[in-house]
Amino acid sequence: MRKGVMRPGHVQIRVLDMDEAVKHYVDLIGLIEMDRDDKGRVYLKGWTEVDKYSVILIEADEPGMDFMGFKCVDEATLDSLAADVRKLGIDVKEIPAGDLPNCGRRMQFVAPTGHVFELYATKEQTGKWGISDVNPEAWPRDLKGMKATRFDHCLLYGDDLDGNLELFDVLGFGLAEQVLDPEGNRAALFLTTSMKEHDVAFIKHEEKNKFHHASFYLDTWEEVLRAADLITMTDTPLDIGPTRHGLTHGQTIYFFDPSGNRSEVFCGGSYYFPDHKTITWKAEDLGKAIFYHTRELNERFLTALT
Amino acid sequence: MRKGVMRPGHVQIRVLDMDEAVKHYVDLIGLIEMDRDDKGRVYLKGWTEVDKYSVILIEADEPGMDFMGFKCVDEATLDSLAADVRKLGIDVKEIPAGDLPNCGRRMQFVAPTGHVFELYATKEQTGKWGISDVNPEAWPRDLKGMKATRFDHCLLYGDDLDGNLELFDVLGFGLAEQVLDPEGNRAALFLTTSMKEHDVAFIKHEEKNKFHHASFYLDTWEEVLRAADLITMTDTPLDIGPTRHGLTHGQTIYFFDPSGNRSEVFCGGSYYFPDHKTITWKAEDLGKAIFYHTRELNERFLTALT
Amino acid sequence: MRKGVMRPGHVQIRVLDMDEAVKHYVDLIGLIEMDRDDKGRVYLKGWTEVDKYSVILIEADEPGMDFMGFKCVDEATLDSLAADVRKLGIDVKEIPAGDLPNCGRRMQFVAPTGHVFELYATKEQTGKWGISDVNPEAWPRDLKGMKATRFDHCLLYGDDLDGNLELFDVLGFGLAEQVLDPEGNRAALFLTTSMKEHDVAFIKHEEKNKFHHASFYLDTWEEVLRAADLITMTDTPLDIGPTRHGLTHGQTIYFFDPSGNRSEVFCGGSYYFPDHKTITWKAEDLGKAIFYHTRELNERFLTALT
Amino acid sequence: MRKGVMRPGHVQIRVLDMDEAVKHYVDLIGLIEMDRDDKGRVYLKGWTEVDKYSVILIEADEPGMDFMGFKCVDEATLDSLAADVRKLGIDVKEIPAGDLPNCGRRMQFVAPTGHVFELYATKEQTGKWGISDVNPEAWPRDLKGMKATRFDHCLLYGDDLDGNLELFDVLGFGLAEQVLDPEGNRAALFLTTSMKEHDVAFIKHEEKNKFHHASFYLDTWEEVLRAADLITMTDTPLDIGPTRHGLTHGQTIYFFDPSGNRSEVFCGGSYYFPDHKTITWKAEDLGKAIFYHTRELNERFLTALT
């Protein structure tokens, strides 16, 4: 949190059929439905998140990610960071408060990889779902499916990774992990503004603005197993897992929503502080970097994007 | 234990290079080396096993399984079961005590699938390894690698499954689970003489006497993860996992010893009593039956045999 | 299963208020309500059990255990075991089929410690709850509370442990573990007729026929944690745990039903085969034998009996 | 990290006998011995920590904590925070670089509760122990005992909690959780400068400068069980656990070093961001706040201090 960006605060995901999507994100992943708006958007969150929502589902003709937002410590930080981003030659648009319901003004811009990001500092706080701020119980008893605790990060594919590294450095993110090819070119960036090993990550890809997955945090490896079981019980398309990543060392499973967007649930993984040296994975060992156990990429992981 | 057969007591596995094999079974899987004999055979066991050994490694020109032995409650049971087996028209050979060191006489025969099995009732008991019979601690502190607790079962491939079912019924085994094709032919048998969901299993295959894997028991799904990590750290060839089986619902990982023999470590899984109805998996759903999460067979699982 | 007794099949527990009791055993422990009879008795089971029920709750003026029943492999075994028990000078009463609904005839007798046991061979089989016999899923999605998988064993307090040891030896049970005082007197017996480290256990106590607890099996140590959390969330009186036993090395938590009967949920623990040497704990180390971590008994564990 | 303080960086613990202390912190807890100095001090760390050491053991006549240090992002932050602390009327002493080996200058002061704290920005970085910065394996294979991953926090007892709250607010810490009595007085402060629910905590106590425990992080609840087992196997005095805290919801076990200093190993627990509302526990429910499962304090927890 070197410059006042706290965490991934929300992501807007395009889905082809809202009813099917809600079954996936609410009944299967276990996010809580918090609201719907008059445009038909559905607002969700994981039960440990204190803000009103973190995932926005919107019906559209094709799947993918509309934008990802980061929450900052205060409104002043928004202006200061917007100024810093503009200095990079990136246009920043201010969207007024209320455009997203219960959310303050947002400073929105397109990253060099073509993805839309935004910063905001204010969102209605409803507190953790299902437990009190006073004498809180350990967890709420009415969780569904995988019982995902929070929206954690996104992995995005795009072309200009050097540009994004410069942008996120300006936003105070650290480069926790990277993949380097023998010529020293970066093939992947794992960027963080917190103790988490990644708040957003990018993998090099010829097209701009591709969405690889949104990720949700589980408490334990046993929850990852139960998530895997639920994927089977619900005939949900599996990508890969349960397994461990080399990058971040998190324990993970990937699967697809009914629109073709990939979801991840994971647990564990390394932690980061700003004085940590960047961890490097060699591009020639990308298989092991991504899938620590098989040490092989599956084609789908590299090409199924939305 | 309907007729006095207690459990899988030992398996003799052929390996191409003993030093490499010991690294696999002792340093990686965590079996304890208990003895070597003048033929160069190495005797191993898991730490919870009370008999002196359960895995016998023998150097040979090609990998595979020489024989699998079941321990019976007493010597009288050997004679009675041998008589029952002979009634099936199967020749039973008595091998005198001491042929395997520290082991009593063995009644050996070839099953209809071509695999060699034997029954015995006596083996030197050295007790659980590393803990006492009096005020035992929960586990020994000096275990290596995956810390496998016991030799658990074998999965074998062969042709005459109906013949084997008849044989193992005579030995008092129950058919805990099976795979049936639409014509009602059995494609797999999971047989047990204990509370375990399988003490030996067979999958239909055109060749006789093929060895699919020997399996070792771990305590928890977290140990399966650590096993997977160790497979990677030691550059051991992985087959598949961590995952769950449909058949037995055990949580598992498969990998190969340096000779090409497959090993499994697993935990969990269903339990069996003699009044349990046989669980049936449909052959058309064999992918899910074998690999519950991917719901797809990998070719290697069906064809990499020794 | 040396003589045809398979497992603990049922226990009848006296409760002061049925509605409160059902909340405890169904909503909290997660047993399934399978039936009620015209005497107001409620029939429950864990989801992995294939018979129709295993726990019978009956309203009464004081708490405790009415009887514990063991299921045998067939009706002929009942007569043979009844004859063996009578040879010990113990009276055996035959209760006709249907006295317990959906249950065959039962051979009932009073053990030297004053507890009522019975043997039976027939009970309606409804299969595992919530999953099919064909292509079964890994677990049912609608389980409640602690999601207990089965009724596992009882621990009973009474005076004549030597008499009970003789009785259960006649029934084919093995003495998996014992507590011995310096004079060689037995202070505790852990008896089993299966691979489980105990199907019934006795602790020396001056009174006859006291009930210490009924125990239910959980899959993992993480489930024990969740059970502990639920005990707190429901303001259920805790006895002790989460912890590990020395005896059996199981991982456990104890708590009380609204009538004062103690319940246990546990996981893990050692396994037994008939050739295992009895494990001995020294009476002077009883604290560690019972509670492996604290190495101290709590007074309640020894005196809160029903 | 509102004002540039990153994390607890080190703690100096007084021990009566260094050889015994090393057995406790290295062989049992699993910290790595990194160095010794000519004053006989021993320097330790958890394997995931990138700086050279985090725990300093020093032989002394009585146990307790000498000081706790927090690492800041850079040297300029030290001066700025020292100035802020001095504005509170607290004397700040600058200790030159090298006074602690491999450590830069430290700004040291006494908190209102009488505890000595210090800030520093520079320490030799040796990287995570046992794994590489390039293609790192998931964990090192040669860890001992409980395999503690890092020094995590201290809990300290003292009188002037309001004074400490003001001090740590100036240092940029947030109040993640608190205990309030009915009059609104704070009985406990859980303070954090990271995503962790506490980097340092204070409990109200009449004496100044008492040390309750130093805490080390484990990965899983299963590791907490193994820690508990090791405490028993090594005859280490147990305080309480395994259990869960109400405050932070971490899963924990407490035990004592040979000098009487309390140690904690724990896993899990809530996470914190600066916009989180402070969680409040009522002083009248302090039992549940501290020990979520027993809902009772043990006297030792409140009075065994060093």
Image (cartoon, coloured by chain):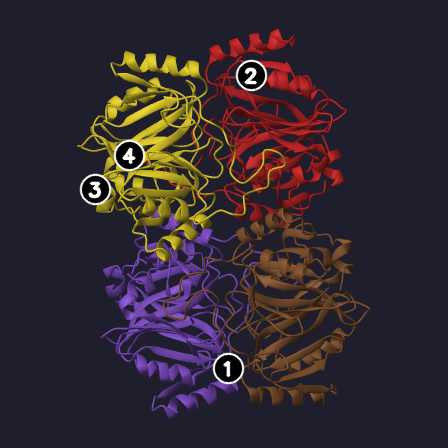
Chain colours: A brown, B red, C yellow, D purple
Residue labelled with disc 4: C65
Q: Which corner quadrant of the image does residue B92 belong to?
A: top right
Badge 4: chain ID: C
Percent across and percent down for residue A298 are 75, 53
- Which of the marked residues, 3 or 4, is nearer the chain's N terminus? 4
**Which residue is farthest front?**
C38
> Which percent across, then down, holds residue A21?
66, 61
Relative to B234, does residue B67 appear above or below in the rendering? above
Q: CA distance from mark 4 to mark 1?
A: 63 Å
Give the residue type at disc 2: Leu
Local secondary structure at mark 1: loop
Chain ID, mark 3: C
Circles 2 and 3, Cβ within 8 Å, touching? The answer is: no
Q: Are marks 4 and 1 on the same chain?
A: no
- List x then y, in percent, for residue D9: 46, 72
Q: Which mark is residue D4?
A: 1
Q: Which residue is mark 3?
A: C303
Q: Residues within 10 Å of mark 3 (few under 14, many from 20)?
A: few
Give left or right: position of C137 versus B208: left
Which label lies toward us, 2 or 1? 2
Q: Is residue D58 left or right of residue D103?
A: left
Foreground pick, C256 / B47: C256
Residue named by callout 2: B171
Task: Point out residue C294 in the picture as x, y percentages from the top left corner.
Answer: 30, 49
Report the mark closest to the observer, 4 or 1. 4
The quarter of the picture where residue B136 lies is: top left
Kind of residue indicated by mark 4? Met
How far apart marks 3 and 1 lie (CA) works out to 56 Å
Crowding at dot 4, Cα within 10 Å, few <14 / some 14-19 / many 20+, comes out as: many
Label 3 – label 4 distance at C-alpha: 16 Å
Both marks 3 and 1 on one chain: no
